[in-house]
Image (tube, rainbow, N blue to C red):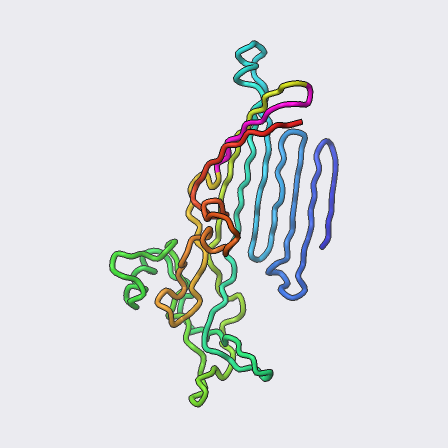
Amino acid sequence: MALCRVNSGGGSAEGSLCWDPILGPIVSTMVLRIITSQHSVGTVRLMSGTICPLLSSYDLPNIGRNGFANAVLHHWGLDDRISARSGFPVTLGGDQLLQPDGRFFFAGLDVVPNQPIYLYGSNCTSVLQGLNRLKAGQGCPGGRAINPNAFVQVPVDPNTGNATRRGTAPRNFVRGFGAWQMNLGVRREFPIYENLGLQFRVEAFNIFNHPNFGLIDPSLSSLTFGQATATLAGSLGSSGLNSLYQAGGSRSLQFALKLVF
């Protein structure tokens, strides 16, 4: 990991580069943070599976000097976070492949030439309904799916039923859905005495209520192969959080009041 910081003219920039010696550019990350006296933008991550969170915080200028303006228009601020990323790799399944040490691994799938890897929109619906992988009236979740016609199972040993080799589809060959979400907070400071004050906040998570899709079915033998089977919020495992509060959840609001000193 390399880290670089620059400070100049009331602003600062910070960058870091992380590299995994095994996964290489899949997790190589660059982080850029720019901070000015009143407005800050931070954390930009760039990788082959790109993650780009942008953060900003802005204190609104105080307008007016009379008693009404002091009571209503002063000490407001905005905090914003926009998170966007490209799709994560999908590990394609397949039959089991016996290793020399006796362990089994999934062999993956073979790629069928001259077939599109992904299906989109009405074409996705038409193809999957023709394969009886979607019911009449159903559409592809998120308007996209991995094409089942683009892959076949690898050859198997007739005696053991195990795969005879690895599939021709490379590792990290296909990807799931990207995701983006914007969280917005509005705050008001109420000075009490010197450095003592109250802060009231209203925070909206996924303020645009943008749907984000999560898990992709990797098993070719499944009727839902290549389709999103859950939202992103429902795909992050059991962390003790309600899916409403997970990244990729539906829009939610919270109110907070804290003492600042």
Query: 257 or 161, which lies in front?
Result: 257
Residue drawn 56% across the image and 10% down it: 67
Q: Is residue 240 left or right of residue 130?
A: right
Q: Residue furthest bottom?
A: 159
**Residue stretch in magenta:** 194-204
Q: Tell me the quarter of the image containing the C terminus.
A: top right
Residue drawn 50% across the image and 34% down it: 203
Q: Is residue 44 left or right of residue 215?
A: right
- Does 224 lie within the magenta span? no
Q: Main secondary structure of the magenta part?
A: strand
- Residue 3 vs 218, above or below: the answer is above
- Does 197 lie within the magenta span? yes
Total numbered badges shown on the rendered structure: 0
Q: Position of residue 214 (x, y in %)?
A: 45, 55
Residue 64 image-quadrant placement: top right
- Residue 84 vs 167, above or below: the answer is above
- Residue 125 vs 186, above or below: the answer is below
Residue drawn 57% across the image and 19% down it: 74
